[in-house]
Structure formats: structure tokens, C-alpha cells
Image (tube, helix red, strand yellow):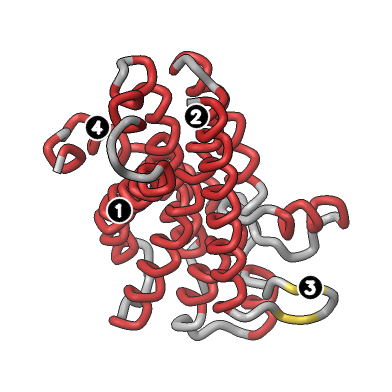
């Protein structure tokens, strides 16, 4: 409710996806060598969707630092509920806000050639929600050790930016140098971005070589990782960070 009522916040959060998709996407599309069979902005759209939840969800996690500074966290900690419930609630709240914001960004896909159908929308929303749970769980872990919001903000940026650039949100993962290919596979956000791009490209009539260059499958030792395993990786990472956050808050609070 607070997210919907804060129109200034909504405008600021939506401005970045608009700039990435229509300004950067149009600019790069004029210089990046891609096939005429697909608009570069269509390729970029799943990555922009991921970025639209990235910042909102991560900031939801580090908002615990704000709660600590103003004493609200202390009141929650003495309430007759478990610390795990507090942390899971923060994660789910951040994921819900981020996914609602992404629903607005989702509409932009109609302007860049994304062939929406019910199956595609549901797949994108599933990937977005699973991915947006992982990011606030990481933010909560940061919040366990950081005491001031002035420190938390740059630290969250330090976490977000490498994940964004190494996820394939802005460039194809085909034909990368070996070291960069390894880093993209170690990045958990990759496993939220690539299923969305694969779902979009499944509905485009593209030559095989174009599909392979723009949307290569994620592989582990030659094995093509299926969608449910990719989302399972994201869910597992989320669970690990929630467990770490609970342990850290047990010690520090």
C-alpha cells in the first residue's frame, strides 16, 4: 500500500527502465551488430525487466538499517514472533513491491516487439518473483552488519552493479572470454535473467544461428540447464541468504 501511494518513488523507479529500454536500447541498437530478424530492444527487454526489480528489491532488504536507526527494529525483535518470520516478511514484502513495479514495466514490451501471450506473462512473472526474493535476502544480510544507512546505500550498489553486468541483462552470453563466461555462471542473477529471455525468444521466429548468438543456453559442462533448475538455483541461493541473515541477527540484535 505504501509503495502504491508513493507516486514520486514509483516515478523514479520507473524512469531507469524507460531510459535503459528506449534510450540506451535505441542507441546501442544502431551500432551493435545484430540480425535484422530481431530488434535489439526486444533482446534487451528481459534484462530491463530484471533491472527494474533489482534495485527495488535490494533496497527493501537494506531498509532494515533504517529500521534499526529509528528504533523500529528493536521493537520488532522483542515482539512474540521469530526472527526468521521478520526476515522472511521483509523478503516477501520487497519481492512483492518489486514484482508489482515490474508489472508496469512489462507493458513496455508491447512497444519493442515482444509477442505476449498468457504463458509468456506467467513465465516472466514467476521468474521476476523468484529473482526478486533473492535480492532482498542479500540486502538483509548486509543489514545485519551495517549500522548506518549512509554506509548501506553504497554497499548495496557495490553488490548490485556487478550482478547486473554479469547476468547477461545487457549483452549476450555467447562467445565470451573464458574467465567472463565463468563469472556469468557463478552469478545467481544470471539464472533469473536467462529464463526470461529464453521465454521471449521461444515466441520469436528466428534462424537458429541468430538464436544461438543472442540467447545461448546456460550450460554446465556441456549440459543445457533447464528452466526449473535455473529457478531452483535462485531459490536455493535465497534460502541460503535467509539462513545466514537469521544467524547474523541472532548474534547482533
User: Where on the picture, by quarter, is residue 208?
Assistant: bottom right
Q: Residue 143 carries which label?
A: 2
Going from the N terminus, do you reach mark 2 or mark 4 first?
A: 4
Going from the N terminus, do you reach mark 3 or mark 2 first?
A: 2
The kind of secondary structure element at disc 1 is helix
User: Where on the picture, by quarter, is residue 49?
Assistant: bottom left
User: Where on the picture, by quarter, is residue 23?
Assistant: top left
Q: Name the residue under label 4.
A: 9
Q: Distance between the residues labelled 1 and 3?
A: 31 Å
Q: Nearer the viewer, residue 64 or 76?
A: 76
Q: Residue 96 carries which label?
A: 1
The picture places residue 31, in percent across and down from the top left corner, at 60, 50
Q: Mark 3 points at which residue?
A: 220
Going from the N terminus, do you reach mark 3 or mark 4 first?
A: 4
Q: How far apart are marks 3 and 4 (CA)?
A: 40 Å
The kind of secondary structure element at disc 2 is helix
Q: Do the residues labelled 2 and 4 touch (CB within 8 Å)?
A: no
Q: Nearer the viewer, residue 229 or 84?
A: 84
**Residue farthest right in this picture:** 178
Q: Distance between the residues labelled 1 and 4?
A: 15 Å
Amino acid at each position: 500500500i505504501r509503495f502504491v501511494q508513493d507516486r514520486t518513488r514509483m516515478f523514479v523507479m520507473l524512469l531507469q527502465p524507460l531510459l535503459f529500454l528506449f534510450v540506451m536500447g535505441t542507441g546501442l541498437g544502431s551500432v551493435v551488430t545484430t540480425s535484422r530478424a530481431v530488434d535489439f530492444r526486444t533482446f534487451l527487454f528481459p534484462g530491463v525487466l530484471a533491472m527494474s526489480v533489482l534495485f527495488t528489491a535490494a533496497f527493501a532488504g537494506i531498509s532494515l538499517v533504517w529500521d534499526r536507526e529509528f528504533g523500529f527494529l528493536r521493537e520488532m525483535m522483542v515482539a512474540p514472533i521469530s526472527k526468521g518470520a521478520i526476515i522472511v516478511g521483509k523478503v516477501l514484502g520487497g519481492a512483492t513491491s518489486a514484482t508489482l513495479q515490474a508489472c508496469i514495466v512489462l507493458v513496455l514490451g508491447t512497444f519493442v516487439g515482444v509477442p505476449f501471450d498468457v504463458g509468456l506473462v506467467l513465465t516472466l512473472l514467476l521468474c521476476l518473483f523468484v529473482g526478486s526474493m533473492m535480492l532482498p535476502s542479500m540486502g538483509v544480510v548486509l543489514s545485519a552488519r551495517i549500522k548506518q544507512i549512509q554506509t548501506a546505500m553504497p554497499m548495496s550498489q557495490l553488490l548490485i552493479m556487478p550482478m547486473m553486468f554479469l547476468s547477461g541483462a545487457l549483452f549476450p552470453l555467447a562467445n565470451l572470454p573464458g574467465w567472463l563466461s565463468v563469472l556469468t555462471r557463478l552469478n545467481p542473477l544470471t539464472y533469473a535473467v536467462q529464463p526470461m529471455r529464453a521465454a521471449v525468444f521461444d515466441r520469436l521466429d528466428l534462424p537458429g544461428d541468430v538464436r544461438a548468438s543472442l540467447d545461448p543456453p546456460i550450460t554446465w559442462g556441456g549440459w543445457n540447464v533447464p528452466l526449473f533448475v535455473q529457478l531452483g538455483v535462485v531459490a536455493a541461493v535465497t534460502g541460503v541468504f535467509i539462513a545466514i541473515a537469521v544467524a547474523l541477527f541472532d548474534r547482533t540484535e
